[in-house]
Image (cartoon, helix red, strand yellow):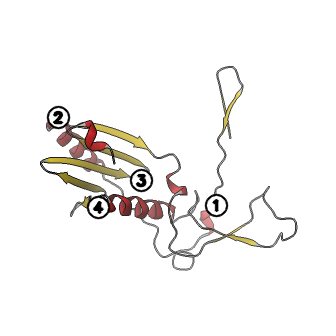
Amino acid sequence: KVKLDELGGILKNKARLVTRGYRQEEVIDFEESFAPVARLEAIRIFLAYATHKNMVAYQMDVKTAFLNGNLREDVYVSQPDGFVDPDNPNHVYKLKKALYGLKQAPRAWYDMLSLFLLSQDFSKGSVDPTLLIRKNGNDLLLVQIYVDDIIFAAPTLELCDL
C-alpha cells in the first residue's frame, strides 16, 4: 500500500509482511490464540469512573502491536512472493516474532504488554484481566487494554509517565 498526499505524491509506503494464518490449525500449529478483550461495558465504567474522579484520560492505538509479541511455539512460514531465495526456493522461514495474520499474534501482544505493565508495579484486576491498576500513595493510574488500543487515566499528567 502507498499513502498519498493531497497532490497525489507518495507520502509513505504502508507495506507490512502478513502471514496466511487461515492455514493454521489449533492444537497442531498453536495451542492458544485467545487474547482477553475488554467488554464495551467495562470501557464505559472505566470512563465514567475517570470522569467522576476528575482524572486525565488518554487513548492510544499501538500501530505495530502484533509485530512486538514473542511466540510461545515455533512457527514456520513459506517464503512470501517477492522474497523467495533463488538458491533455496523450497526453504521456509522460522519466525522470531509474531506477524500480522498469525492466529496467536493478539495473544502474544497481550502477554508481552501485560508482562511489561506488571513489571512496572501494576496489578491485574481480579474480575477483568484487561484492567491494570498502579497505586502511588492515594493516586491511581488505570490502564484498560482493548486488543491494540489502550486507554489510561490518572489524576495528574505526571503519573502517566512510565
Q: For the residues labelled 2 and 1, say whether their Cβ atoms are less than 8 Å apart.
A: no
Q: Residue 18, how many percent across, how many down?
A: 64, 56
Q: Is residue 12 left or right of residue 139?
A: right
In terms of depth relative to the viewer, which is nearer, 5 or 154?
Answer: 154
Task: Return the residue at label 4.
Answer: 129
Q: Which mark is residue 19?
A: 1
Q: Which amino acid is tagged 4?
A: Pro
Q: For the residues labelled 1 and 3, say whether their Cβ atoms are less than 8 Å apart.
A: no
Q: Which mark is residue 102?
A: none
Q: Is residue 75 left or right of residue 118?
A: right
Gap between marks 4 and 3 measured at Cα: 12 Å
Residue 40 to residue 116: above or below: above
Which residue is at 32% across, 44% downward? 161
Task: Return the residue at label 3.
Answer: 147
Which residue is at 78% across, 58% downward? 83
Q: Residue 162, how many percent across, how many down?
A: 34, 48
Q: Which amino acid is tagged 2?
A: Asn
Gap between marks 1 and 3 measured at Cα: 19 Å
Q: Which amino acid is tagged 1?
A: Thr
Looking at marks 4 and 1 on the same chain, the residue that comes earlier in the sequence is marked by 1
Q: Quadrant of residue 20?
A: bottom right
Q: Quadrant of residue 19?
A: bottom right
Looking at marks 4 and 2 on the same chain, the residue that comes earlier in the sequence is marked by 2
Question: Dot 4 lies on which element?
Answer: loop
Q: For the residues labelled 4 and 3, say whether their Cβ atoms are less than 8 Å apart.
A: no
Looking at marks 3 and 2 on the same chain, the residue that comes earlier in the sequence is marked by 2
